[in-house]
Image (cartoon, rainbow, N blue to C red):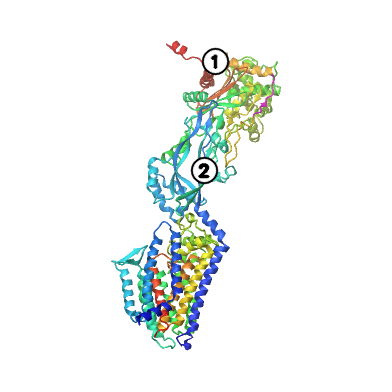
């Protein structure tokens, strides 16, 4: 029985998705090396990839249904970790308490990991419901599940991470038969309310000068303040543009990151490094790789055996797509500078591990699509 | 689709998410195309501009020598603390003001000025924050290199004037170009903080003395720290200037003014045969080193302010900017004018002294009673009555013709900036005629002996005296003997050598006999007249003294003492004039000063063993 399962598992294992994710991560390690060749970020990232691959395999070969059953426990544990960040166990970096130090485990970022229990919790709740139009009460419960981690993350405060939680819920609600008129109404309200509240906020002084500059820096980075908020955007755009068609091809000594013009090159601005070193060709290849990965995930969702599995995959896929767009959009100067890592590329063990665990779930769900 | 939930359009909803995700990726692709393909070259250039910086390498300024190769000005190494603009862009410069001010002992006001100046520059250039940095300053900058990456210590040659206050007016000094000068056409291409000549030869010949700076092209990081060097262009030095000055004579002249009663005055010497200036001493004077080193320290600024406020006007070059009544020295050009106007001739040149002259009801006295002298004794004994009558015969038009002949109505053209022009009956006549209705005879009488409407610069007077001695050949006085050439380099063109550009003399019309009579009169003044004080046995000096009233005689200020000379009397090779302010009679006070210069001249010309004199003294 076990042997049969194993053989069948191997046959149904999603090799393409796995190899694609690992390939993107390896490409990322190369770019981290390009960003700061003299620092040890890239070697750490190799170790991180090893750990992440192991965790990925463990999750992939575990029955996701049992994990979804235990979702409330994981969810509670996730909230506990996020809470601990706010206690003296939390480590403050650049005015943000986003890190937690624990004995044996070391230092990590709970806000990255807490996405998984949040997705599972949402999937558990919305996976059991009947296929009828979404009720208002259900909407509120979905919002409450999200409010726990997001609230704690906002206390750190880490607005960038908090924002990445919203697409998780949005995807689940969208796929849980929320009425189209609600969606249209929400989009309309956003289109009207966001500019209006921005205007009112500026006029009344609720939106501070620096916040306003950060937003206006997107519209015209040169005019706002090239030394302040516009600086990161301008330097990022210069770095990307400098890459041209084929990149600088090894001329690392005068690269934007080595000369420290590009801030945070190994994390938030890793895509700018990619653009500088591999040019338009490398960037488009990476975008295509992401597109392929996302379509593999979504294809898996279509084949999922149950509703909860489908929701887990779609929620994860939506989260990844959103984060990719936020990060690269910021790098290309079309979105404000918000510290969101680029999935599979940015240096950082927590994000790498969390992403591989999430993909592990997807593979696990796909692998069990023929099993009941 | 395994989940059969067609009622919910689940498949369509999943598809919608997929399409949205792909659309977002497509947006990123389009933006990438715009940044990398469409504007790739632009961003590449911007990246290059921000990482490449040109660090100027200052060029050594040409040295200045006297005619015998003695150094008058050169440069010696000093250290500057310089500031780069790029690292300052991301910080609040206001915070730096007290920090720099404390660390480098600078006035906060100076630091503010510097920081304002650097804002006007292009990005990758540097500006001197403090020059002549002390060892403490250098140590402070090195110790704070992490906190203030914008600061750096650079070696720079600094101008040094070894003779201090001597020749300061001729040499001038150097300093940073002023904002106003930066806008002028003469200094286009220079940047704030560049050093240019100010005053004297340093200013007049700045373009030639100034070298052409080189630069280092380097790659810097975002904080302005140098990562590597791409190219070095070495500077080209400025041209060395050989002047016509004679340091020994100059020092003799300087000491003579120092030892005079008022310690104020000017002594000039030139070679009448070509206009080369051998001496130009003007005292009181200033120390150019104070301007070079001290303009940014409290003590230096105080000293400079004192120079400006000093009532004795040490910054003013009496030789070319001072305007004095020439007194009886004026009788020399008057004599030439007398011949030229036909008021007297070689054979008929006697005028009555009369002890003075009566104009209307006012009797203007002569200093003595000279009978009816001819020209030679009139000059030798300085007979005023003679010149009253000569002047009246020439009429004011004749005097004005003489003024034009000797060019008192314009600059001499000496190669120094800010030369002044004297005032003469030519410039006064329209004013007087407007005010008094006519030009009165009494003013002609006064103008005949260099008073009232006549004030001239010493430089214009020595030019006249030299021309009279040199048989009517009048040269433009000048200091430039030669600019040494500089060979071409890989990056700079050759700079050819050259001499003074106006070597041709103006010819003053007079016969040999007339010239000889005037020279004889001046020689007689030395041997038996008013200028006996400059009598040097074995060396025929021709001289004319003068005593010039300083303002209203009732004010009680003593007269200025004048003497104008050339020697040897009948084949002059040197002319010397002296003016000592507010001391009294010319012969008594200015005479010894000029004699001191002649003694130095003769000591050089005929070097004699020192022993006999020593023995004689014992």
Relative to A214, residue B21 above or below? below
Residue B324, quarter of picture: top right
Relative to B137, residue B605 above or below? above
Q: Main secondary structure of the magenta part?
A: loop
Viewer-side label of 2, 1: 2
Relative to B41, residue B482 above or below? above
Does residue B296 appear in the picture of this structure?
yes
Q: Is residue A13 magenta?
A: no
Task: Find residue B171 and report its horizontal and vertical position in percent.
Answer: 52, 33
As helix, strand or loop, the secondary structure at mark 1 comes to: loop
First-in-chain label (2 vs 1): 2
Residue at the disc numbered 2: B194
Q: Residue at x 33, y 80 (%)?
A: A70
Q: Nearer the viewer, residue B536 or A315?
A: A315
Q: Is residue B577 left or right of residue A206?
A: right
| Badge 2 and badge 1 in a common chain | yes
Q: Nearer the viewer, residue A151 or A129?
A: A129
Q: Chain of mark 2?
A: B
Q: Residues within 10 Å of mark 1 (few under 14, many from 20)?
A: many
Task: Find residue B160 and report its horizontal and vertical position in percent.
Answer: 47, 34
Q: Residues within 10 Å of mark 2 (few under 14, many from 20)?
A: some
Q: Chain of mark 1?
A: B
Residue at the disc numbered 1: B535
Q: Residue at x 47, y 40 (%)?
A: B156
Rounded to the nearest angstrom, the CA distance separating label 2 from label 1 is 51 Å
Q: Quadrant of the N terminus of chain A?
A: bottom left
Does residue A150 appear in the picture of this structure?
no
Q: Which residues are magenta?
A: B503-511
């Amino acid at each position: 029985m076990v042997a049969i399962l194993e053989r069948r598992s191997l046959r149904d294992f999603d090799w393409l998705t796995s190899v694609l994710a690992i390939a993107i991560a390896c490409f990322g390690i190369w770019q981290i090396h390009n960003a700061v060749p003299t620092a040890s970020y890239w070697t750490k990232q190799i170790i991180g990839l090893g750990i992440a691959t192991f965790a990925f395999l463990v999750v992939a070969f575990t029955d996701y249904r049992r994990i979804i059953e235990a979702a409330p426990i994981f969810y509670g544990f996730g909230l506990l970790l996020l809470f601990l960040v706010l206690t003296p166990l939390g480590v403050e970096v650049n005015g943000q308490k986003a890190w937690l130090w624990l004995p044996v485990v070391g230092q990590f970022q709970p806000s990255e990991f807490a996405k998984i229990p949040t997705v599972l919790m949402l999937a558990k709740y919305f996976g059991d419901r009947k296929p009828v139009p979404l009720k208002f009460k259900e909407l509120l419960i979905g919002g409450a599940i999200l409010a726990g981690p997001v609230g704690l993350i906002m206390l750190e405060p880490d607005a960038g991470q908090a924002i990445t939680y919203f697409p998780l819920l949005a995807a689940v609600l969208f796929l849980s038969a929320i009425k189209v008129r609600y969606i249209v109404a929400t989009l309309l309200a956003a289109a009207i309310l966001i500019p209006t509240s921005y205007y009112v906020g500026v006029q009344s002084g609720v939106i501070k000068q620096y916040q306003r500059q950060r937003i206006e820096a997107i519209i015209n980075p040169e005019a706002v303040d090239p030394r302040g908020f516009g600086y990161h955007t301008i330097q990022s755009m210069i770095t990307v543009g400098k890459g041209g068609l084929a990149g600088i091809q090894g001329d690392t000594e005068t690269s934007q990151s080595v000369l420290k013009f590009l801030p945070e090159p190994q994390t938030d601005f890793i895509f700018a490094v990619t653009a500088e070193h591999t040019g338009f060709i490398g960037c488009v290849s990476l975008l295509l790789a992401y597109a392929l990965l996302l379509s593999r995930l979504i294809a898996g969702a279509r084949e999922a055996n149950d509703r909860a599995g489908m929701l887990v995959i779609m929620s994860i896929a939506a989260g990844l797509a959103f984060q990719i767009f936020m990060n690269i959009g910021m790098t290309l100067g079309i979105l404000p500078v918000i510290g969101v890592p680029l999935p599979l590329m940015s240096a950082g063990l927590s994000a790498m591990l969390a992403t591989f665990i999430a993909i592990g779930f997807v593979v696990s769900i796909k692998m069990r699509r023929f099993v009941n | 689709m395994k989940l059969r939930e067609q009622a919910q359009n689940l498949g369509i909803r999943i598809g919608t998410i997929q399409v949205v995700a792909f659309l977002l990726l497509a947006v990123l692709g389009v933006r990438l195309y715009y940044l990398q393909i469409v504007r790739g070259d632009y961003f590449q250039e911007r990246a290059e501009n921000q990482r490449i910086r040109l660090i100027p390498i200052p060029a050594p300024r040409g040295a200045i020598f006297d005619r015998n190769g003695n150094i008058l000005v050169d440069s010696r190494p000093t250290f500057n603390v310089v500031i780069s603009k790029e690292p300052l862009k991301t910080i609040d410069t206001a915070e730096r003001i007290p920090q720099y001010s404390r660390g480098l002992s600078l006035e906060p006001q100076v630091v503010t000025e510097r920081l304002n100046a650097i804002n006007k520059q292009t990005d990758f250039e540097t500006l001197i924050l403090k020059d002549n940095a002390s060892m403490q300053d250098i140590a402070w900058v090195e110790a704070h290199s992490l906190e203030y990456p914008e600061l750096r210590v650079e070696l720079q040659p600094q101008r040094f004037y070894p003779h201090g206050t001597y020749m300061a007016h001729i040499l001038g000094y150097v300093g940073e170009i002023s904002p106003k000068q930066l806008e002028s056409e003469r200094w286009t291409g220079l940047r704030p903080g560049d050093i240019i000549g100010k005053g004297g030869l340093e200013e007049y010949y700045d373009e030639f003395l100034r070298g052409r700076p080189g630069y280092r092209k380097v790659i810097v990081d975002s904080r302005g720290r140098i990562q590597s060097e791409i190219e070095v262009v070495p500077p080209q030095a400025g041209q060395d200037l050989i002047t016509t000055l004679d340091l020994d004579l100059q020092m003799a002249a300087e000491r003579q003014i120092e030892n005079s009663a008022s310690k104020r005055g000017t002594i000039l010497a030139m070679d009448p045969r070509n206009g080369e200036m051998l001496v130009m001493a003007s005292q009181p004077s200033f120390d150019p080193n104070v301007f070079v080193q001290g303009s940014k320290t409290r003590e230096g600024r105080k000293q400079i302010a004192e120079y400006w406020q000093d009532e004795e006007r040490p910054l003013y070059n009496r030789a070319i900017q001072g305007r004095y009544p020439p007194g009886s020295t004026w009788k020399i050009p008057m004599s030439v004018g007398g011949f030229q106007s036909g008021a007297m001739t070689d054979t008929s040149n006697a005028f009555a002294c009369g002890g003075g002259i009566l104009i209307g009801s006012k009797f203007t006295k002569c200093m003595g009673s000279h009978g009816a002298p001819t020209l030679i004794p009139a000059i030798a004994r300085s007979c005023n009555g003679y010149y009253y009558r000569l002047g009246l015969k020439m009429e004011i038009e004749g005097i004005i013709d003489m003024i034009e002949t000797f060019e008192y109505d314009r600059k001499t053209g000496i190669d120094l900036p800010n030369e002044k022009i004297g005032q003469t009956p030519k410039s006064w006549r329209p004013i007087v005629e407007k005010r008094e209705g006519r030009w009165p005879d009494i003013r002609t009488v006064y103008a005949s002996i260099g008073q009232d409407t006549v004030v001239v610069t010493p430089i214009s007077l020595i030019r006249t005296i030299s021309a009279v001695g040199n048989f009517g050949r009048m040269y433009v006085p000048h200091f430039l003997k030669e600019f040494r050439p500089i060979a071409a380099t890989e990056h700079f063109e050759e700079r050819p050598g050259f001499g003074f550009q106006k070597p041709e003399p103006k010819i003053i019309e007079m016969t040999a006999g007339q010239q000889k009579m005037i020279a004889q009169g001046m020689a007689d003044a030395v041997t038996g007249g008013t200028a006996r004080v400059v009598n040097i046995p074995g060396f025929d000096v021709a001289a004319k003294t003068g005593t010039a009233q300083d303002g209203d005689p009732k004010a009680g200020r003593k007269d200025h003492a004048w003497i104008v000379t050339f020697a040897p009397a009948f084949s002059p090779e040197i002319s010397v004039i002296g003016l000592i302010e507010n001391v009294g009679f010319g012969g008594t006070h200015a005479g010894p000063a000029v004699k001191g210069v002649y003694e130095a001249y003769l000591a050089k010309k005929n070097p004699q063993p020192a022993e006999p004199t020593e023995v004689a003294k014992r």
